[in-house]
Amino acid sequence: MASAMKKEKVAIIGSGLIGRSWAMLFAGVGYQVTIYDIIPDIVEKALKETKQELDNLEKQGLLRGNRTAAEQFACISGTDKLKDAIAGAIYVQECVPERLDIKKKLYTEVDTLVGPNTILASSTSTFMPSLFSEDLKHRDQVLVAHPVNPPYYVPLVEIVPAPWTKPAYTAKARELMTEIGQKPVTLSRQIEGFALNRIQYAILNETWRLVADGILSVKDIDVVMSEGLGMRYAFLGPLETAHLNAEGMLNYCDRYCNTIYAVSQTMGPTPRMEGKVAEQVAKELEEMVPIDKLPERRAWPHTMRLNEHLQIKGNHVILVPYEKQHVEKYHQWMQSEELQELTASEPLSLEEEYRMQSSWREDNDKCTFLILDADRYAETNDEIDALVGDTNIFIKSTPDEEDRTVVGEIEIMIAEPSARQRRLGWEATILMLLFGAEHLHIARYVAITKDTNEKAMRMFGRLQFHETNRTAVFREVTFERTVDEAWIAWLKAATGTYDVVPYGAVQ
């Protein structure tokens, strides 16, 4: 049961995507939120879209916060009067367009309306807070709280004080960001580009040089990030990675500082993203993702292949990627007529099995892990010896563009007879369900099993799936389960240990 709603008020200035995301985040923990925009019809439209978004998130099992969609929307109101929006607010989040003249005009007006205790935070990604707060009476209350778009799904917030911002307000802003589920970082002082964009620009500049110098194609440069650095940095930042890649950071500096400096000296001046190189980059990108496919690409996160570089650790099982060294043992399993029948599979030659493994690694719609007996692996440190089965999620998106839902069909196979009756399949299934919900954004699960497989049917019943269909011709039973926060909490309690960590050594 949700706790009582809060009495404190938060004002959101600007009703675009960023503003609505902020409103939902604050409402998720019960703050009374007022969205302000200059035209009544725009405010009304924003409220309608916010309600639809909250309802859709709830249906998909992606709603954040500790309240239902209806309870959250009950916390949100709108107004076209700035004074009414700000009155009584403990915190104001400004989300107007990125034009300095607009921000200066707005903050001058806000300065006449706000009290001495209200935090004034800007969502700007461009302007240091001093640029629009220097002449304000309440300038010591102004800071930047820069989100990453879209803030509802990407939790980082950069908190940037102006030279005159009171530390108490900076600390309180960070506290609020943590409370609503974001991940704040606090800069000690303002700096152009803040932190995220400075790092992002450094990467863009060097990738631009590599294209301009004819070293790599656009596609291959993106592979360097998506299949290399991106996988690494999704779990470890660059400094911790360096710390782990040697015997601590000082040892890393001893080993690599001269090399890093020497390579960096060859990088040349900062490039301008224009001219023939811009045309070349645009051409290659449009071959990868045509302009008319951009909305589709944005809507589909393509996070399924995360499993290539991850392992999932439980109490008694470890889920690892399906690698080439595993193929021979997997091939031996699948010679079993029993497993062929249970998995509706045809026997393959060893060469075909290698091709299958390779195709699975390239499949954005299938997520596969092999199951290790953790106790056996602890004894032998041999993955092949510890292999006992596999688990898969087949991923699809519902065709309804207005209510797109990511659906996952889950499979589990314990192939080693000696590993059965030990609840390894139960634990592996829970780990996979959690991974799919939290990393692949699965909103609804489907499980299909033979009606002769009584153990599987009982297991999915215990996992709180419900039967939705029986097909007499194929002798199959279909089970389904919608993902929600309560069920995720139940799954975590049922397994006890659930850690997603990089697979293998980081080089």
Image (spheres, rainbow, N blue to C red):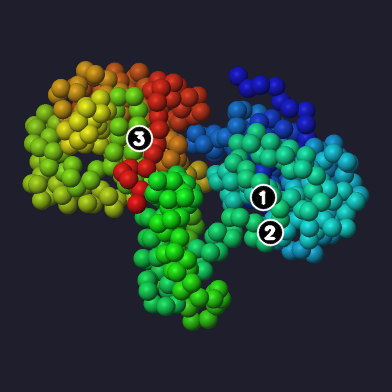
Q: Where does the image place residue 249, in percent across and percent down from the top left? A: 46, 49
* Residue ID at (71%, 53%): 189
* Residue ID at (34%, 19%): 461
N-term mark: 1 or 3:
1
Quadrant for residue 336, please give it: top left
Q: Secondary structure at mark 2?
A: loop
**Vertical relation: 121 (above or below) 409:** below
Marks 1 and 3, how far apart in space?
34 Å
Front disc: 1 or 3: 1
Q: Is residue 3 visible?
A: yes
Q: Which residue is mark 1?
A: 187
Q: Where does the image place residue 304, in percent across and percent down from the top left? A: 37, 46
Which kind of residue does numbered mark 2 sit on?
A: Ile
* Residue ID at (34%, 52%): 507
Marks 1 and 2, how far apart in space?
8 Å
Quarter occupied by the N terminus? top right
**Closer-to-camera residue (481/189):** 189
Quadrant for residue 337, please give it: top left
Marks 2 and 3, how far apart in space?
39 Å
Query: How many other residues sit within 10 Å of disc 1, few (<14), some (14-19) or many (≥20)?
Result: some
Q: Which residue is mark 3?
A: 312
**Vertical relation: 63 (above or below) 297:** above
Q: Is residue 288 left or right of residue 60?
A: left
**Closer-to-camera residue (152/80):** 152
- Tag on residue 191? 2
Q: Is residue 52 left or right of residue 226?
A: right
Q: Secondary structure at mark 1?
A: loop
Front disc: 2 or 3: 2
- The answer to whether the residue labelled 1 contacts the one labelled 2, judged by CB atoms less than 8 Å apart, is yes
